[in-house]
Amino acid sequence: MKPRTLLRMLALFILALLIVQTLLLLSNESIVGSSSSTPTTLGRDVVVGGGARTGGEAVVFPHHRTAPFDGNATTTFTPHEFLAGRREDYVNLPLHPADGEDPDRRDDEVRRLTMEYVPPPSEELMHVSPIPPGRNAILGLASYPTFAIGWRRLLGSLRNAGYDGHVIMGVNPNLPDEERDYLDRMGVTYYAVEVVDCDPSILDERVAEGGKEEGTKNAVRARCSVGLEDLKLEWGRYEMARRWLRACESCTGWSMVIDTRDVFFQSDPFAVLMEEYTRHDLLFVEEIANHTNTLPSGGPQRATNLGRSNRFVHHTVPCYGKDVVRAYELTDRPMLCSGTVIGTRDGMHRFLSVLVDEFRRNNRSGKPECRSPHTTDQWTMNHMYYRGKFGSVSTTRTLPWGTGPVLTVGTPCVDQRIEDVRARIGRKDMIVFDPHTGLILNPHEEDGSPARIAPILHQYDRCGKWMRDWFEEHRSLFNAGGGVRLEDEPAVAWVRAAMNVSSER
Ligand SMILES: *[C@@H]1O[C@H](CO)[C@@H](O)[C@H](O)[C@H]1NC(C)=O
Ligand SMILES: *[C@@H]1O[C@H](CO)[C@@H](O)[C@H](O)[C@H]1NC(C)=O
Ligand SMILES: *[C@@H]1O[C@H](CO)[C@@H](O)[C@H](O)[C@H]1NC(C)=O
Ligand SMILES: *[C@@H]1O[C@H](CO)[C@@H](O)[C@H](O)[C@H]1NC(C)=O
Ligand SMILES: *[C@@H]1O[C@H](CO)[C@@H](O)[C@H](O)[C@H]1NC(C)=O
């Protein structure tokens, strides 16, 4: 045999090896893909969530036993797995979009939105904290004229829990000095949110003219802020968070956009985001639903099942239409809370970009029913999630009530069957306490789980008197330094250290 022929054969052999190798790889991928049933959708999702991911772990396919978008409500939602104690098999995935939008096209659209230019914050920066040791971020709007005890509950408990990441807040420009000083010592970066009238074009003029706009009592519903006159505060806060997060270059870890008025912490919420969660870049928190209700079946039911909620229908159907909302397909689905959303830097950016775009799009539709006060953040967000509007289904999940970083106690603390409205709130029968510390537990986490003590309590204001008494008994949770007055509370250590350095200069 001529050496040239030999060489040619060798080359062919190597080529064949390469082809076999590639085929093997491909077949392996399709095995992974087919266990999730819709490989094309999932494949694209990874690109959305991936790319320049900075926080969290690498994206791996979640082990869904079921397919998103197969139109089969029983396989996109598995409450029975949760009830049987198989949490890893629990899914609460979106249904097929009912407006005819192709899921792949949606992913393209979501990707386009996340790549759009993000303007710098329109609010004036009042204070920049020294760069904290941690890279996670908590963002929220608390534009109350004064919020003294609220700050202590929110920030005191957070820092006391050892959280050493960013806190970025929107505050009232005239915040009292002692509150500002407290925020400085707690390592908070804050922007001045100046409240003004909204651009009239975003309101339903039929309601506005009558001067009886629904929700005018609630400041968040009625007003806008300087620079964001095209978004009511309740929506504008998501655009603020989007810009603040982008402006914070060292916020490269997990982030959380939260309500501020009714939130406190018992531990660092990000510390429980371990393996179970890190395959994902966007986490929605479920409120209590039938399958997570801990009251015995047949006993008083204190859960909200989305499709059965008249308020959900009332706030979505007039804008989107009955055939697009399809509440009947969401009968037993849990309501997701818009006041505590968790994501990596990229996942959170995706969520915020899509949500804010929807608010603007609803205004542009020109339909009064799509404008304020008819559409609200939480109901709109729920409709969007369950129709796959946030894209990247494979890297997005919902966290069952009573597990994970957030325990939402609003509905559990309110018994709707009691006629006297004031007597409804303040129920305690669904709350589980740690026998040693008295701290509030996640009912569906096992003893020894890092999230057994609920890291975040949300909507505690509906728990009434027992919660106020509980605050009294657990004062040390809110002031690690033992300061009786806000002014006496010492700065967190890394802020103190940074202040020393700058005063030496
Ligand atoms: C295919 O998957 C198997 C099992 O996960 C693994 O052992 C093997 O290395 C993979 N093959 C290739 C070519 O990636
Ligand atoms: C839908 O769910 C039902 C009940 O679990 C099952 O029998 C059926 O095969 C599923 N259909 C598809 C297309 O997955
Ligand atoms: C609610 O869940 C219980 C199990 O906890 C179940 O027996 C009951 O049928 C469910 N009710 C509805 C209306 O789905
Ligand atoms: C709201 O939508 C209308 C069209 O329906 C448009 O003329 C107006 O400019 C929009 N307002 C804002 C602030 O974008
Ligand atoms: C800051 O400086 C004071 C006085 O110089 C010193 O007593 C204190 O230990 C320093 N604190 C930190 C955190 O370095």
Image (cartoon, helix red, strand yellow):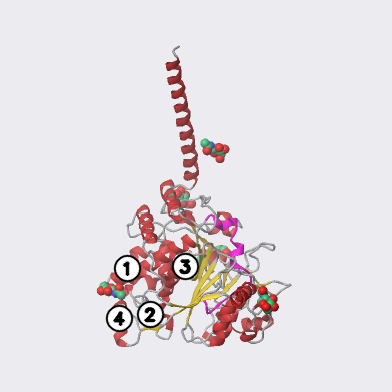
- SS state under label 4: helix
How many circles with numbers are drawn on the protein? 4
Q: Earlier in the sequence, mark 2 or mark 1?
A: 2
Spatial separation of the CA atoms under disc 1 and disc 4: 16 Å
Height in image: 152 above or below 75?
below
Check residue 361 in the rendering and tell me which mark sits there, or answer none.
1
For this orientation, the residue located farthest to the right is 436
Discs 3, 1 touching: Cβ within 8 Å: no
The spot of residue 139 in percent (x, y) is 50, 72
Residue located beneath label 2 in the image:
226
Check residue 200 in the rendering and tell me which mark sits there, or answer none.
4
- SS state under label 1: helix
Q: Amino acid at mark 4?
A: Pro
> Residue placed at 74% from the left, 72% from the top?
436
Q: Is residue 326 left or right of residue 54?
A: left
Quadrant including the N terminus: top left
Q: Nearer the viewer, mark 3 or mark 4?
A: 3
Spatial separation of the CA atoms under disc 4 and disc 2: 14 Å
Q: Amino acid at mark 2?
A: Val
Spatial separation of the CA atoms under disc 2 and disc 1: 21 Å
Q: Amino acid at mark 3?
A: Leu
Camera-nearest residue between 286 and 117: 117
Discs 3, 2 touching: Cβ within 8 Å: no
Residue located beneath label 3 in the image:
245
Q: Is residue 478 left or right of residue 219?
A: right
Q: Amino acid at mark 1?
A: Arg
- SS state under label 3: helix
What residue span does the magenta drawing correspond to?
259-279
The spot of residue 258 in percent (x, y) is 51, 72
